[in-house]
Image: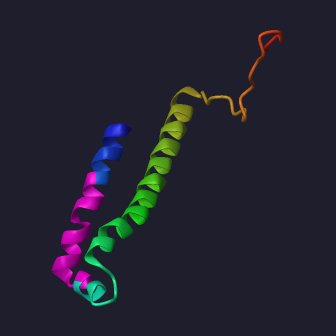
C-alpha cells in the first residue's frame, strides 16, 4: 500500500505546477496580490487532503478484498481496552 501511495503522490503532485504554467492558469493567479512564495505552500493542504482520501479508499478496498476472500475482518473496538496490572483482561 505504501508504494502505491508514494507513486500516486508523485504522479499527482509533480505535474501540478508545470501544467498550470503551460495552460496559463498560474499567470492568472500570480496577477492577484499573492506572492510566488505562497503559491506552492498553498497547494500542499489540498494535495495532502486528496492523498489522504486516496489512502482511505485504498485501505477500504484492501479491507473489502480481505473480507471477500477470507471472510475475516478485525474486531472493531474503539477505544481499545487497556488493562491495569491488577485487573484481569478478557
Image location of residue 13, percent across then percent down: 28, 60
- State the quadrant of the C terminus: top right
Image location of residue 54, percent across then percent down: 44, 53
The answer to whether 19 is drawn above or below residue 82 in the figure is below
Query: Does the magenta-highlighted stretch encompass residue 24?
Result: yes
Q: Residue at x 27, y 90 (%)?
A: 31
The answer to whether 36 is drawn above or below residue 31 in the figure is above
The answer to whether 69 is drawn above or below residue 13 in the figure is above
Q: Main secondary structure of the magenta part?
A: helix
Q: Residue at x 23, y 60 (%)?
A: 14
Image location of residue 18, percent across then percent down: 18, 70
The answer to whether 26 is drawn above or below residue 84 in the figure is below
Please identify the residue farthest to the left as the structure is shown. Answer: 22
Which is more toward the observer, 41 or 28? 41
Q: From the viewer's perspective, is 28 left or right of 53?
A: left
- Please state the extent of the stretch shown in magenta in the rendering: 10-26
Amino acid at each position: 500500500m505504501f508504494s502505491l501511495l508514494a507513486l500516486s503522490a508523485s504522479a499527482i503532485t509533480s505535474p501540478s505546477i508545470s501544467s498550470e504554467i503551460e495552460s496559463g492558469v498560474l499567470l492568472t493567479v500570480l496577477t492577484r496580490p499573492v506572492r510566488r512564495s505562497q503559491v506552492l505552500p498553498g497547494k500542499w493542504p489540498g494535495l495532502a487532503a486528496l492523498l489522504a482520501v486516496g489512502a482511505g479508499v485504498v485501505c477500504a478496498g484492501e479491507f473489502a478484498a480481505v473480507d471477500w476472500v477470507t471472510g475475516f475482518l478485525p474486531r472493531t473496538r474503539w477505544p481499545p481496552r487497556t488493562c491495569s496490572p491488577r485487573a484481569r483482561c478478557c
